[in-house]
């Protein structure tokens, strides 16, 4: 009961903060604020389950905005390449949880592809960072430690002509590139160097 009361107080505070009647007449409808108001409405009506659904909707909108902000930190496609729409997925708890932002880049004239993934809030990142302990540790997992700008990156050759590169930026943010059909290591490292790392970390 105490938790439910605290939950209600939090909703009321958010409702008051977003319910200025003067602003309501001039401001455009905001889906996030609408979801908060619906949560308050349902809570006041004695429907905590429905209030939770509305709060989950508000959280999903925040997650979407965060993913879009992180996506804007990624470089434009290389010359002669195009990029598909970005999507965000949950990382299964078995693989560390958190979220992963995905964007596929394709060469317009060839078959080369580059899958870009940005992991955040995942314990998987900490495991990857552990490979930086030494060259021997990295090599034991098939990686070579290289640099992309001022950041360390783990490069693994896949087959005869493809590469996987992991670049952890912090314990809770990592960029992973997977090349296909001959995408070169140099192009992938250049892509990593061109990422707006400050914007990416700010968005996390």
Image: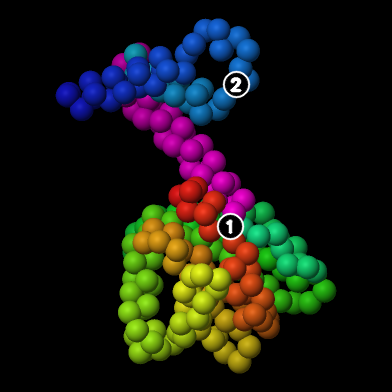
In what quadrant of the picture does the N terminus appear? top left
In the image, is residue 55 part of the stretch drawn in magenta?
yes
Label total for image: 2
In the displayed structure, 91 sits above or below 38; it is below
Which residue is pictured at 36% across the width and 78% down the height?
131
Classify mark 1: helix, strand or loop.
Answer: loop
Query: Is residue 39 something one can see in this rendering?
Result: yes
Q: Residue furthest left?
A: 2
Residue drawn at 51 percent across, 65 percent down: 175
Crowding at mark 1 (Cα within 10 Å: few <14, some 14-19, many 20+): some
Q: What residue is shown at x 82% (from left), y 74% (from top)?
A: 109
Q: Main secondary structure of the magenta part?
A: helix
Q: Nearer the viewer, residue 104 or 152?
A: 152
Residue range in magenta is 45-73
Location of residue 52 in the rendering, given as x and y in whole percent from the top left corner: 36, 30
The numbered mark, 1 or 2, whose residue comes first in the sequence reads 2
Question: Separation of disc 1 and disc 2 at Cα?
Answer: 31 Å
Which residue is painted at 50% across and 48% down in the image? Answer: 203
- Residue 183 percent across, percent down from the top left: 67, 79
The residue most toward the bottom is 160
Please name which of the two marks, 1 or 2, marks the residue nearer to the observer. Answer: 1
Task: Sort mark 2 into few (<14), some (14-19) or many (20+) by Cα contacts within 10 Å.
Answer: few
- The residue under label 2 is 29
Q: Is residue 33 above or below residue 70?
A: above
Residue 43, picture quadrant = top left
Give the image quarter of residue 180.
bottom right
Q: Which residue is mark 1?
A: 196
Q: Is residue 58 magenta?
A: yes
Give the image location of residue 153, x and y in percent.
48, 75
The answer to whether residue 42 is seen in the rendering is no
């Amino acid at each position: 009961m105490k938790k439910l009361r605290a939950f209600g107080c939090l909703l009321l505070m958010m409702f008051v903060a977003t319910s200025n009647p003067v602003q309501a007449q001039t401001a455009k409808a905001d889906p996030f604020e609408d979801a908060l108001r619906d949560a308050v409405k349902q809570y006041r009506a004695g429907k905590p389950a429905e209030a939770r659904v509305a709060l989950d909707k508000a959280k999903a909108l925040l997650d979407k905005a965060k993913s879009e902000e992180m996506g804007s930190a990624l470089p434009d496609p290389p010359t002669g390449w195009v990029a598909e729409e970005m999507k965000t997925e949950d990382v299964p708890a078995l693989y560390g949880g958190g979220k992963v932002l995905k964007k596929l880049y394709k060469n317009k004239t060839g078959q080369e592809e580059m899958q870009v993934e940005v992991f955040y809030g995942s314990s998987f990142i900490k495991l990857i960072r552990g490979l930086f302990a030494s060259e021997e540790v990295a090599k034991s997992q098939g990686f070579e430690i290289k640099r992309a700008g001022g950041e360390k990156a783990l490069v693994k050759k896949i087959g005869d002509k493809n590469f996987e590169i992991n670049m952890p930026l912090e314990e809770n943010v990592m960029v992973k590139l997977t090349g296909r059909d001959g995408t070169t290591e140099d192009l992938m490292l250049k892509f990593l160097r061109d990422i707006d790392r400050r914007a990416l970390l700010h968005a996390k």
